[in-house]
Image (cartoon, rainbow, N blue to C red):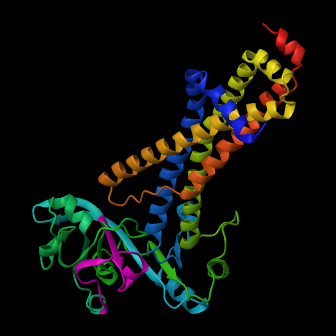
Amino acid sequence: MGFFALNSIAFGGIKSNKFRTFLTLLGIIIGVSSVILMVSLGSGTSKVVSGQFQDLNTRQIYLSSNFQLPYQQRGNLTAENVNYLQNAAQGIDKIYPFYRLYFNVKVGRQAKDNRIIGALPNTDELTNLEVKYGRYLDQSDLNNRSRVAVVGETFLRELSNRTEFSNFIGQYLEIDRKQFLIIGILAEADTTLTIPDSSVIIPHTTASSIWRRQTRYYDYALIPYQADHSEKDIMEQIKYLLKLKYGLTSEGESRYYFEGLSSSVGIYSQVVTIFTYVLGGIAAISLLVGGIGVMNIMLVTVKERTREIGLRMAIGASRKEIRIQFLLESVMMAFAGGMIGVVIGVTLSSTANMLIGKYFDWWQGVIPIWVIGLSFLVTITIGVVFGYYPAFKASKLDPIDALRYE
């Protein structure tokens, strides 16, 4: 018997009980659509994370006191430390120390406690912070200990409920009841490292001259390194130089904390990727359940059609043809479920991405083509794997016993 004839017989077997066929397909449909939806949302999240981090300068090391140690054992970050590392380490041109303070900030009649960053000129280049209006700090601000400030647009929005901020340039704000001239407005950023976009940034010499007690030590430093040096190399140098000059605690711990921002961003991206695969894996379990459903229904079908199998074998059908017939039924059901599941999965994913994008501008919804192809491949495999045993069992029936079956 030809392949097309077997196809026709298999299709007729599927049509004979439409409701049961639909229930069998339901497991496959739910499994495929769930996998596509979960992988789509996970891939969208991964793309957002990658897009947010791609503009960051991650070729830098974050250095601070080791705050996990008791106060007496910590190493303090001073100008001496900064100069020592800058002169002794290779691959480092300049180290940028920062003060991090918290004071009440008043703009007009509105006031709010906020983060104050004492910084050097050009430190905006170490992050993805962008000056939207006005300018950033320059060397003259540092030399003159000028009372000037660069303010985050996020902070001004929270304080004033405005949407236009350019007119804040040239106005004054109060930090701890001391007046500062606003010279720049920072644009909102999706992701920032070390300096939130809601900060108020002032020259670090101004901070140290006004709040002497709070600025005896730097809070942290950023250490950009040259392109011909690796993060591991710079980290090893810093670790060795600090150990050489300041020693370790009695437990052998460093008095300073340092981490490579490139590694940190890489780990975060890996976590998001793993999360995507975990979501897809959880959804794929329903595909396995759907496959078991296919096998169960096919075994029931073989049982119900025992006399038909015996009759076909009695009039000349070979065991191979019987096996192929029932295997084709299983594959057809799995393929049909996969097709419907892909359509539903793509529709749900597109709808979800559209709704999320409507409320969150940063969302980058995506439906990976590979997950659609993989879904088809898996459903066909499920049809073959879970349909083979029932097909094999049907082909092994004895024709005489099958014809006698009631």
35 relative to 162, above or below: above
Residue 133: say if magenta: yes
Residue 343: say if magenta: no
Q: Is residue 245 left or right of residue 192?
A: right
Magenta residues (range): 115-139
Q: Which image quadrant: the C terminus? A: top right
| Residue drawn at point x = 58 percent, y = 57 percent | 370
Observer-nearest of 401 and 105: 401
Residue 391 seen anywhere in this rendered image of the structure: yes
- Which percent across, then down, holds residue 244? 67, 81
343 relative to 96, above or below: above
Residue 285 seen anywhere in this rendered image of the structure: no
- Which percent across, then down, holds residue 263? 59, 69
Residue farthest toward the top in the current orientation of the protein: 406
| Residue drawn at point x = 53 percent, y = 40 percent | 341
Residue 140 found in image quarter: bottom left
Q: Which image quadrant: the N terminus? A: top right
388 relative to 195, above or below: above
Observer-nearest of 224 and 384: 384
206 relative to 278, above or below: below
| Residue drawn at point x = 10 percent, y = 61 percent | 109
Observer-nearest of 348 and 144: 348
Q: Is residue 245 left or right of residue 318?
A: left
- Which percent across, then down, holds residue 356? 36, 50
